[in-house]
Image: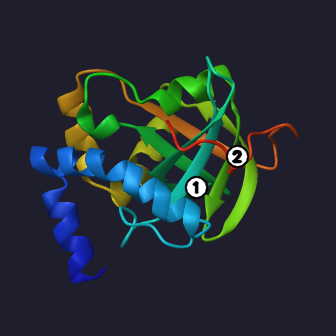
Amino acid sequence: MGLYTRVLKRLGHRRWMAAFGRRMVPADRWVQRRTGGRVAMMGRGFDALLLTTTGRQSGQPRVSPLVYARVDGGFVVAGTNFGQPHHPAWTANLLAHPDATVSVGGESAAVRARLVADGPERERLWRAMTAVWPAYDTYAARAGRPIRLFLLSPGQAAADAPKAQGTDVT
């Protein structure tokens, strides 16, 4: 792990860093979409993906840049929302429409999302996420709500999973 990544992991626990991260999401989404997921601003030094969900109310594609952990041949993502008290919109979209698309390193794949609510599997997957970004523990404590944790399994999504060329709004 390089110096840049170590410094980011230390700063990630600070409130100002979470606020900065929230403000960077639209710019990061734009960069990742324009580079096909090959370049990520927020994911520099970390594994980042673009998650395209179907909006639960609009039915339109919604794109979210997220840090992830690779586990069990899939991707684990956490709805921390930088420690805010409300869940991020993409998590409600996945609950309503679990078929989605991920773009990682310029490659896209259809996935099926499964909420991992509790038990030993959740503990194992949460440890995988905090190994990638230790500040998730701080975000969880700050949020004061259960953090939604999803396992995205490739190759299990329906043929009509959203395509990555939709709108930029989450």
Q: Which residue is mark 2?
A: 153
Q: Closest to the observer: 110 or 126?
A: 110
In this rendering, position of residue 26 left or right of residue 143: right
Q: Closest to the observer: 132 or 100?
A: 100
In this rendering, position of residue 142 left or right of residue 73: left
Q: Closest to the observer: 87 or 169?
A: 169
Q: Which residue is mark 1?
A: 71
Badge count: 2
In this rendering, position of residue 136 left or right of residue 12: right
Q: Is label 2 in a helix, a strand or a loop?
A: strand
> Farthest residue toward the bottom?
2
Pointer 1 or 2: first along the chain = 1
Q: Is label 1 in a helix, a strand or a loop?
A: strand
Q: Do the CB atoms of the residues marked 1 and 2 lie less than 8 Å apart?
A: no
- Quadrant position of residue 112: top right
Q: Disc 1 residue type? A: Val
In this rendering, the answer to whether 121 lies above or below 70 is above
- Quadrant position of residue 6: bottom left
Tell me what residue is drawn at x 43 percent, y 53 percent.
128
In this rendering, position of residue 47 left or right of residue 70: left
> Farthest residue toward the top?
57
Res 14 visible:
no
How would you rate the neighbour count of disc 2 (Cα within 10 Å): few for under 14, some for 14-19, many for 20 or more? Answer: many
Q: Disc 2 residue type? A: Ser
- Quadrant position of residue 54: top right
Q: Nearer the viewer, mark 1 or mark 2?
A: 2
How would you rate the neighbour count of disc 1 (Cα within 10 Å): few for under 14, some for 14-19, many for 20 or more? Answer: some
Image coordinates for residue 41, horizontal then vertical, percent: 38, 66
Image coordinates for residue 140, horizontal then vertical, percent: 27, 34
Tell me what residue is drawn at x 14 percent, y 59 percent.
11
Give residue 30's mark. none
Estimate the spatial distance between the alpha carbons at disc 1 and disc 2, rounded to whole Å: 9 Å
